[in-house]
Amino acid sequence: MKKIFILGSNSFSGNHLVSFLLKKKYKVYGCSQSKIYPPKFNALSQMPTNKNFVFHQLDINKNFDKLKKMILEVKPDIIIDFLGQGMVAESWSYPELTFNSNLISKIKLYELLKNKKFLKKYIKISTPEVFGSANINKANTNKYNPSTPYALSHSSIETYLRLIKKEYNFPVIISRFANFYGPYQRLYRVIPLAIHKAFHKEKFYLHGGGKSRRSFIYSEDFCKGLYKMILVGKVGEFYQFSSKEYFSIKEVIEKIYLKFKLDPKNYIVNVKDRPGKDKDYKINDSDTRKKLRWKNEFNLNNGIDYVINWYLENNKKFNTKDKKFSIKT
């Protein structure tokens, strides 16, 4: 059985993938800057203690030697990279941290890995934000148009990965997913935050009127997409994943308030937009669906229902800190 190393295993998406792979009996190694989250935000909490998961807490910017030692000892067949500063708006306030986490520290890692024969696949989790508001029809396009430091850090690292694939045959696969959501997501993200506020009959302050359109992909669907890349994804390829549905942020929030039988007009408050906000993220995943034989099984409506059920089961465990986010520097 292949050994899989997940960078950023405590992230919402990384945590779900660890749980998914352990059910498939893989040996999984993980690292993150944060400690293992409490059960209310931890998909692994639904599983018994598993000896096939080895976790280390570390900051790649401060503990690179520790990460280097781990990787050289484990010799993973596959590395899946969720690691980095993942908050778009905060990248304007912390551009240096964003670039250190998402770009500079990764280049050090690639220098370590580029001639290691044990590594068969390096799956980089990127973002459609590298294209800005462009309507992208091809997965392997390089027509980048980033509009935030966050997006620029990802387009830069994608470009660097293209270079070392060409020069050193580095075994990279790049994936770009629509917006992740599902149970166990922290409350400062838009879907769980809207659920939290609707449950408590609180107002939702919506940046820029919520006109931006997005596709959202449910946790089980993106885990199955990543699993397809592990099994049959080809080195050098780019894969894109969406649900084929597109909604404005306002439509998503309205949908959630209506599920609580509340009139959204009485709760949604428009506020000034944040800098660099893209209008739309449209990606064509038809090649991915064909090549990987993948398809999403959840639409936004039933996916939100599952998240609401998780929230209702845990709502007494949440506190005011759970809906606040702060960058660790």
Image (cartoon, grey):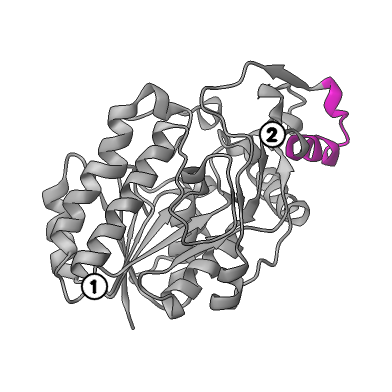
Stretch in magenta? 252-266
Please give the name of the residue rendered at 80% of the width and 35% of the height, measured from the top-left corner: 254
Determine if the magenta segment contains residue 149: no
Is residue 24 at all visible to an observer of this figure?
yes
The disc placed on residue 119 is: 1
The image quarter in which residue 205 lies: top right
For the residue pair 237 and 73, the one nearer the viewer reads as 237
Q: Position of residue 157 (x, y in %)?
A: 31, 49
Q: Hey, which residue is sitting farthest front in the picture?
A: 143
Q: Is residue 110 left or right of residue 233?
A: left
Quadrant into which the N terminus falls: bottom left
Crowding near pointer 2: few (<14 within 10 Å), some, many (20+)? many
> Could you tell which of marks 1 and 2 lies nearer the N-terminus?
1
Q: Is residue 261 magenta?
A: yes
Quadrant (top left, top right, bottom left, bottom right) of the C terminus:
top left
Task: Look at mark 2 in the image and give the residue it sits on.
Answer: 194
Which disc, if any, is residue 180? none
- Under mark 1, the amino acid is Leu
| Dot 1: element | loop
Residue count near mark 1 (Cα–Cα under 10 Å), binned few <14, some 14–19, many ≥20: some
